[in-house]
Image (tube, rainbow, N blue to C red):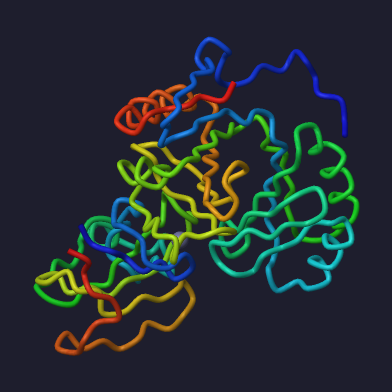
């Protein structure tokens, strides 16, 4: 993995994401800073482009509102010709260079948007109930289960919401909220406030 | 609150969308030849029917794509949804809609 520039600061400082323990927590919050993010615009009908990306380990989901995992990265469907490739922290620069080379000469756009958004993890048995307080999506597991993604609102803030497996509780859902950096503090405070009735653990 | 079926993302709440006004207004073929009344008609004058209206909508908090709706202005029932570039489908105000207004 590439070295991370230590001058880079997380959107939420340590005095905001202070670890809090709660034995009966319905909600577990954490910040997931510095995930690599590359915005991809591409004609979905271009099968050879999809193959060129697959050769780099980048999967390209064509079904709306879904996520496809590749080796080392996963790709979120954003629209009929738009995706977000998410890499581990520090992985974006190398992948961007490889993908730009692999897709050279095509009518595409690859843009590093790593620092546009930060990511907040919401887990725990009440995670969907908390999000439902301010999100107009249908979060029922039958509709928004593992591997689903949607662009929507939390409170009044734009977000990309991803449903992922809960790391602590096998079989349960957890959520990743990708929100603009400058809105991260507001969204964090909104989530902490909404979680009070459920009991809150903050993972530092 | 209405539910609007985005042609790409599926049904979503109205608050994720923004209405762009009347659809299918054609830009004048020869703008230089247009007089003031013609410009006023193109820029400002809009239909305001009691019944079927065709709107442009943008899924602004979702996929950010534009599309068209045929909507009954009395009931807000959505009668047809179609993409930019697709031929506008015929709609009948008495026919059951493609989507129920999710009240
Ligand atoms: Zn959409």
Q: Is residue B13 above or below residue A39?
A: below
Locate the N terminus of chain B by quadrant. bottom left
Count of numbered circles on the image:
0
Of B102 and A96, nearer the camera is B102
Q: Residue at x 84, y 51 (%)?
A: A99
Residue A14: x, y in percent?
58, 13
- Please indicate whether residue B71 sits to the left or right of residue A11 in the image: left
Position of B93 relative to A137 (above/below): below
Image quarter (top left, top right, bottom left or bottom right) of the C terminus of chain B = bottom left
Position in image of residue A98 (x %, y %): 89, 48
Residue nearest the viewer, comparing A113 with B66: A113
On the image, the x and y values in percent for residue A1 come to 88, 34
- Residue for point 86% across, 59% down: A105
Q: For ligand 1, which image quadrant applies?
A: bottom left
Does B40 sit above or below residue A182?
below
Horizontally, residue A83 falls left or right of residue B19, namely: right
Give the percent coordinates (x, y) of residue B80. Answer: 31, 79
Q: In percent of the image, x 50 and y 40: which residue is there?
A: A123
**Vertical order, A17 against B80 (above or below):** above
Q: Taking A56 as reference, is A162 left or right?
A: left
B27 and A146: which is toward the camera: A146
Place residue B101 in its image quadrant: bottom left
Q: Quadrant of residue B58?
A: bottom left
Pick the front one: A39 or B21: A39
Q: Residue furthest front?
A: A23
């Amino acid at each position: 993995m590439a070295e991370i520039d230590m001058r880079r600061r997380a959107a939420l400082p340590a005095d905001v994401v202070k670890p809090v323990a709660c034995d009966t927590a319905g909600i577990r919050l954490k910040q997931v800073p510095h995930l690599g993010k590359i915005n991809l615009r591409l004609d979905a009908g271009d099968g050879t482009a999809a193959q060129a990306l697959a050769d780099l380990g980048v999967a390209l989901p064509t079904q709306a509102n879904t996520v496809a995992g590749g080796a080392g990265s996963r790709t979120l469907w954003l629209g009929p010709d738009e995706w977000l490739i998410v890499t581990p922290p520090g992985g974006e620069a190398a992948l961007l260079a490889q993908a730009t080379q692999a897709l050279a000469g095509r009518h595409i756009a690859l843009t590093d948007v790593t620092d546009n958004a930060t990511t907040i993890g919401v887990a725990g048995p009440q995670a969907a109930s908390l999000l439902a307080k301010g999100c107009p999506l249908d979060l029922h597991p039958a509709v928004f289960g593992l591997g689903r993604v949607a662009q929507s609102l939390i409170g009044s803030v734009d977000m990309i919401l991803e449903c992922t497996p809960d790391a602590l509780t096998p079989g349960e859902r957890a959520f990743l909220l990708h929100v603009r950096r400058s809105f991260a503090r507001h969204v964090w405070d909104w989530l902490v406030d909404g979680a009070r009735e459920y009991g809150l653990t903050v993972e530092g | 609150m209405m539910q609007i079926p985005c042609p790409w993302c599926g049904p979503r709440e109205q608050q994720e969308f923004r209405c762009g006004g009347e659809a299918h207004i054609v830009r004048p073929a020869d703008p230089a030849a247009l007089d003031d009344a013609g410009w006023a008609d193109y820029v400002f004058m809009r239909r305001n029917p009691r019944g079927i209206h065709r709107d442009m909508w943008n899924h602004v908090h979702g996929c950010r794509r534009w599309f068209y709706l045929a909507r009954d202005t009395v009931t807000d029932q959505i009668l047809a949804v179609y993409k930019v570039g697709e031929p506008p489908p015929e709609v009948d105000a008495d026919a059951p809609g493609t989507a129920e207004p999710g009240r």
